[in-house]
Image (tube, rainbow, N blue to C red):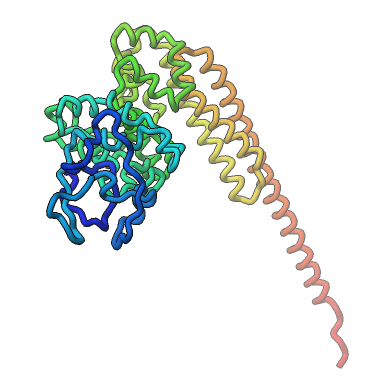
Amino acid sequence: MTRARVVWPAALAAALLAASIAARAQDPAAPGAQPPAQTTPAAAPGAIGDDVHVKAGLTCESCHGRAQPGSTGATPVYAPIRRTAIAPLCARCHADASYMRQFAPQVRVDQYAQYQTSVHGQQMARGNEQVATCSDCHQAHGILQVRDTRSPVAPSNVAKTCARCHADADRMTPFGRSPEVFDEWSGSVHASALLERGDTSAPTCSTCHGSHGATPPGVDAVANVCAQCHVREAELFRASPKKALFEMMGQADCLVCHNNHAIARPDDSWIGFESPAVCATCHDETTGGAEVIRTVGEGLRALHRDTDAAADLVRRAEEAGVLVEDGHLALAAAREAHVRLRVLVHAFATPPFEDVLKEGRSAVESAETAGHAGLAELDFRRTGLAVATLFIIGFLITLFIKIRRLPPIDS
């Protein structure tokens, strides 16, 4: 991350999260420091009009203080920023509830307190200026609202913003962090949902690690992080025998099977005793739980296979012009049962699984019945059409013979 520039035109205003403190200005980190006064510049040619602080009426001096002595004209010079002072400077306003209420009452005022508890904030407090501070994520000038898709902290941009540091091997190695996490996440089911389908509820870095209070979740916290979205899976897992077993082994619950950043879309092939089955990393057909694995794996694959076959029957009937709405409804029920079964895998037991599997098989049978009925109706229609065609041809032949036998018309 680069430091904010020292020289900025007065027009480029904006007291911004990354602004420095002028030599003769009050130290913004000092206890009891007051938020900057709201002032409106007499003229602001070329101002960053989209910046939230400019729109609020703040100017360069609101954060920078006065320009350095001898700095006059259209390009005043401000004192260089101290990275260790950026967060306290931002907190002058953003930690003041009464001040923030004038502009954005919905914005939380505990961000600085959270930052101090984060890995970034703790390292910064020790004087390590290589870690992230406010301006590294939000920019120094031209700060946009989070909901603005151009903002570096908008959901679709968060991972790339984090990657500016966390994908840098030279920067991460001294901290013992892997620089591969961005590439791993980019190939995950979460990244696909967010970046390809535009689902802004899909997890990105800050969803699991936090934003201002960013801290990697420990072994004992991983399941709680995943449970923010995967509620039912978490409930089933906590009630399963695996919970106590993983705790005894010191394993991080969900990560044992799903990984952390490179999370793949679940597949029925994960359940079994041969690669690429996830179960095979710990189990074989002689270990405890083998019967559960066999029942669950075979049940999932059979339901998926039978659903596809029933769908083919329904499709063939529909393409031939037969109404098969009942078949589509049954297929939807079968697919829903399949999704529920994938969730019930986290119970690591057969009773709840087998009950839903029966529902799925029943739905598949209904779809097959609808498909076969549609194809039977199609055959009936074809037979009827053939008979009708023969009847018409016979009628035409008879009519032709009758006409040929009529006496000629006298001229």
Q: Residue at x 32, y 13 (%)?
A: 284
Place of residue 361 in the rendered image (x, y in percent of width and height, measured from the top left): 57, 25
Between residue 18 and residue 316, name the one nearer to us: 18
101 horizontally vs 141: left or right: right
Between residue 68 and residue 373, name the one nearer to us: 68
Q: Residue at x 32, y 61 (%)?
A: 43
Which quadrant holds residue 200? Answer: top left
Assign the N terminus to one quadrant of the image: top left
Place of residue 314 in the rendered image (x, y in percent of width and height, measured from the top left): 59, 41
Between residue 390 and residue 7, name the one nearer to us: 7
Place of residue 59 in the rendered image (x, y in percent of width and height, measured from the top left): 30, 50
Q: Residue at x 65, y 42 (%)?
A: 325
Decide if residue 325 is in sight here.
yes
Rendered view: 354 above or below 139: above
Decide if residue 264 is in sight here.
no
367 horizontally vs 307: left or right: right
Q: How many marks?
A: 0
Q: Residue furthest bottom?
A: 411
Assign the C terminus to one quadrant of the image: bottom right
Rendered view: 260 above or below 66: above
Rendered view: 234 above or below 403: above
117 horizontally vs 56: left or right: left
Rendered view: 270 above or below 25: above
Between residue 267 and residue 401, name the one nearer to us: 267
Place of residue 135 in the rendered image (x, y in percent of width and height, measured from the top left): 25, 41
